[in-house]
Amino acid sequence: MATHVVLLRGVNVGGHNRLPMAEFRRVLESLGYDGVATYLQSGNAVCRAPGPTDEVADAVARALEDDLGLAVPVVTRSADQWAELVAANPLAHLEEDPKRLHVTFLDGPPDPERVAALASAAATLAPERIEVLGADAYLHTPHGFADTKFTPAFLERRLGRVATTRNWRTVLALAEMVDAAG
C-alpha cells in the first residue's frame, strides 16, 4: 500500500455534485483503502491504496459513480509525486500570498505542442503566469483566482487533459497530510 493524494474535480461547487466528505471517506474505505483523511469540502483526500495512481483514480471514479451516482473526474498523485511538485514550483518566488499561487493537476502530461501553444497564448495574459511541468500547471494569479483566464475548463480545452485546480495553501496542507500518513 502506498500513499496517494486523490483530487475530485467539481464537487461541492455552486451547489452542484454535492458530496459530503464523510461519504467520500466511506467510498474510499469501501475500496479497501486505509488511513483515509479528507481536507476541506472540495474533494481532497489522502489515503493508502495499492497500485499506481492511474488505477487508484479509475477505481475511485467508478466507485463514486456506482455507489453515489456521482460522475466526476478524479486525478491522483503519489506521495513522491506530491513532494516533487511542491519542491518544483517555478513560480513560488513571485508571491508570498498562497491564495495567489495555484496548481492545476492534469490527468496526464499534455502534448508538448499544446503546452507550447498555451505558453504563447499565456504571454498575452500578463501579469498572470503559467508554467507546465509534466502533468502539473503552476499558476500565479496576482489579482486572484476569481478573475483568472486560467480556469480548469480553459486549461482542459487548451491542453486536452482533465484538470482540477487547488490553491497553494491547500497544496501545502495536503503535503503535511501526506507526510503524516508516512
Image (spheres, rainbow, N blue to C red):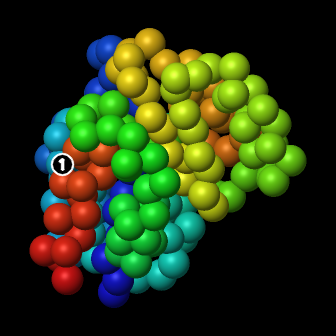
Q: In which quarter of the image is the C terminus?
A: bottom left
Please name the residue shown 44% across and 13% down the image.
147
List x then y, in percent, for residue 37: 16, 60
Based on the displayed image, in which of its 4 quarters is residue 50 positioned? bottom left
Q: Is residue 16 above or below residue 45?
A: above
Judging depth in this view, the residue of 92 and 36 nearest the camera is 92
Q: Position of residue 23 (x, y in %)?
A: 21, 46
**19 vs 75: above or below:** above
- Nearest to the observer: residue 155 or residue 71: 155
Residue 130 x %, y %: 57, 38
Q: Can residue 181 be seen in this view?
A: yes
Q: In this view, does 180 lie to the left or right of 68?
A: left
Where's the N terminus, which quadrant? bottom left
**What secondary structure is marked by label 1?**
strand
Residue that appears at 36% across and 71% down: 83
Q: Which amino acid does label 1 sit on?
A: Tyr
Can residue 16 be seen here? The reply is: no
**Residue occupied by mark 1:** 39
Residue 120 vs residue 50: left or right? Answer: right
- Above or below 63: residue 140: above
Viewer-side residue, 35 vs 90: 90
Crowd tier of the residue under label 1, counting other residues whose Cα lies within 10 Å: few below 14, some 14–19, many 20 or above: some
Q: Which residue extends farthest front?
A: 93
Q: Where is residue 111 in the image (x, y as percent from the top left)?
A: 80, 53
